[in-house]
Image (cartoon, grey):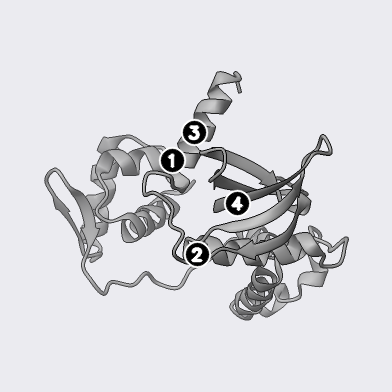
Amino acid sequence: MRKSDRLFQLVNLVRIHQPITAEALAERIGVSVRTIYRYIDDLSLSGIPLYGTTGIGYALDEGFELPPLTLNADERDALVLGVEMLGTCAGAELRAAARSLLVKILAALPASAREPSLANVRALRVRPADEEQRNLDTLRRLIQQGRAVQFAYLSLAGEASQRTVFPLGLFYWGGKWTVGSWCTQRRAYRDFRVERMHSLQAQPEGLELEGQFNLQAYMQFQAAQWAARGH
């Protein structure tokens, strides 16, 4: 990666995560802390309003905006492909958002790169919208609202059950979606295949999830499970 690209990445990281320490910046960019200090000096001399607070980290003056983003050919292909892929597998709401975003991205590209059908790396839709994709919209809204959902579930072993869970996050596994959840019956984190969930019903807003059971705790639980299995 060129130094100019690292400098841009550094400014963007500070803008998103401020305040952020030199150690955290070094880890994310893949350079030494000493190099981060040199980069900070270079950026300050060039007029970027970076400032540091001892024991807290670096931040940008309020109101600072990055210059327009410039993408190379590979980055442009990756961004367009990623948005196009989302448009083939997500729920209707995110598919619509992906189409809108793709229009905005293409409008900002050079005229020679605005026609995605000319790209040699494509994401093609292989099936129509179905119950799974409709469920994705419902689950996504309930995650945003912090609400529980009740549904019928058919396990891979063919066992049918009724579940009430708090959905915490949706995860795409290259063809299959799962929802990470806190199961109110089992009092434990559980994963469910979205295409095996049926008859989803949002639960009343009065049913609340205890604060310690959240997406971060779920991710930590999953990491521990994977480590225990030797992954």
Quarter assignment of residue 94? bottom right
* Left or right position of 110 against 132: left
Residue drawn at x 47%, y 61% as measured from the top left? 146
Q: Residue furthest left?
A: 54
Report the residue marked by disc 3: 221
Pointer 3 or 2: first along the chain: 2
Q: Residues within 10 Å of mark 1 (few under 14, many from 20)?
A: few
Report the residue marked by disc 2: 144
The answer to the question of whether label 3 and label 1 lie on touching residues, with beta carbons closer than 8 A, is yes
- Three-letter code, disc 4: Thr
The answer to the question of whether label 4 and label 1 lie on touching residues, with beta carbons closer than 8 A, is no
Q: Residues within 10 Å of mark 3 (few under 14, many from 20)?
A: few
- Residue 217: mark in rendering: 1
Secondary structure type for disc 2: helix
Tell me the distance, in whole angstroms, between the alpha carbons under discs 3 and 2: 21 Å
* Left or right position of 122 against 163: right
Pointer 2 or 4: first along the chain: 2
Can you say whether 13 is above or below 117 in the image?
A: above
Residue drawn at x 26%, y 42% as measured from the top left? 22
* Left or right position of 3 against 1: left
Secondary structure type for disc 4: strand
